[in-house]
């Protein structure tokens, strides 16, 4: 995984991570699978908030897998390798097992995202929820995306089409993080900096309350990312 430095920077953004978690929390239920658990930023939250659920954390990165096993594995928490383009990995974890699957900034790293979505569909129980957050706006695809291994940035229509092709019932797709567009464009498109700006990220994290107010004004119509709620 080549985006380790960027992931470290974002993992330290407490206000931003709390905000993002709040956006996905309403759709979490039952036994939960997290794809791309990384450093466990959101893993810790779901384990604390759903103590009676079976939680499965997954990663493709060997070092992250070891850290997740060391920190979180318990009687109700499993850790498994999951390459979203490897059918064997899906089969080892099992189909029809989860009430909720969620992945934040993961699907854009997958070459064959349609295959991944079809497999995630099979892993859900009937009426199970899939929550996905991905980057949006094609014009924002820049050196940062390339540096961290992104295959694409999505449009709402593209994500909707691919989810429906995998037989999901799409409940809603909405934008997230309006101000993030400015930072991403300035840093990546104009300055050609392949890394997320650490200093700017720290400043941005402090103004999250303002950002959340702007989201209400724009009614979640525009943002750096899009979030989808879908159901099997």
Image (spheres, rainbow, N blue to C red):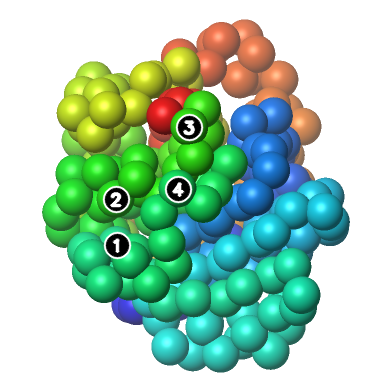
The residue mark sitting in front, 2 or 4, is 4
The reply to whether residue 117 is in sight is: yes
Q: Residue at x 45, y 72 (%)?
A: 59
Asked whether the residues under the numbered discs 2 and 1 touch, taking CB atoms below 8 Å apart as contact, a structural biologist would say yes
Query: Label 3 belongs to which residue?
Result: 126
In screen coordinates, is 127 left or right of 164? Answer: right
Q: CA distance from mark 2 to mark 1?
A: 8 Å
Asked whether the residues under the numbered discs 2 and 4 touch, taking CB atoms below 8 Å apart as contact, a structural biologist would say no
Q: CA distance from mark 3 to mark 1?
A: 21 Å
Q: Which mark is residue 84?
A: 1
Residues 224 and 21: in front is 21
In screen coordinates, is 230 left or right of 22? Answer: left
Q: CA distance from mark 2 to mark 3?
A: 14 Å
The reply to whether residue 152 is in sight is: no
- Classify residue 194 by image quadrant: bottom left
Q: Residue at x 23, y 65 (%)?
A: 87
Asked whether the residues under the numbered discs 3 and 1 touch, taking CB atoms below 8 Å apart as contact, a structural biologist would say no
Q: CA distance from mark 4 to mark 1?
A: 17 Å
Asked whether the residues under the numbered discs 2 and 3 touch, taking CB atoms below 8 Å apart as contact, a structural biologist would say no
Q: Which mark is residue 119?
A: 2
Residues 232 and 71: in front is 232
In the image, residue 143 sits, relative to residue 22, either above or below, namely below
Q: Earlier in the sequence, mark 2 or mark 1?
A: 1
Q: CA distance from mark 3 to mark 4?
A: 8 Å
């Amino acid at each position: 995984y080549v985006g380790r430095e960027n992931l470290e920077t974002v993992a330290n953004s407490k206000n931003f991570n709390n905000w993002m978690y709040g956006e996905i929390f309403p759709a979490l239920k039952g036994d939960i699978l997290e794809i791309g658990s990384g450093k466990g930023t959101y893993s810790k939250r779901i384990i604390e908030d759903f103590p009676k659920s079976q939680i499965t954390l997954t990663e493709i990165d060997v070092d992250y897998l070891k850290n997740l096993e060391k920190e979180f594995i318990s009687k109700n928490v499993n850790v498994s390798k999951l390459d979203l383009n490897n059918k064997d990995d899906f089969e080892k974890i099992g189909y029809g097992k989860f009430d909720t699957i969620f992945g934040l900034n993961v699907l854009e790293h997958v070459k064959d995202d349609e295959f991944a979505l079809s497999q995630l569909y099979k892993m859900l129980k009937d009426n199970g929820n899939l929550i996905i957050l991905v980057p949006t706006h094609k014009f924002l695809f820049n050196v940062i995306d390339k540096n961290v291994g992104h295959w694409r940035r999505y449009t709402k229509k593209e994500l909707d089409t691919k989810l429906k092709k995998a037989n999901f019932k799409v409940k809603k797709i909405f934008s997230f993080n309006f101000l993030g567009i400015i930072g991403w464009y300035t840093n990546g498109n104009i300055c050609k900096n392949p890394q997320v700006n650490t200093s700017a990220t720290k400043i941005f994290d402090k103004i999250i309350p303002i950002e959340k107010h702007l989201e209400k004004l724009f009614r979640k119509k525009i943002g750096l990312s899009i979030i989808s709620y879908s159901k099997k």
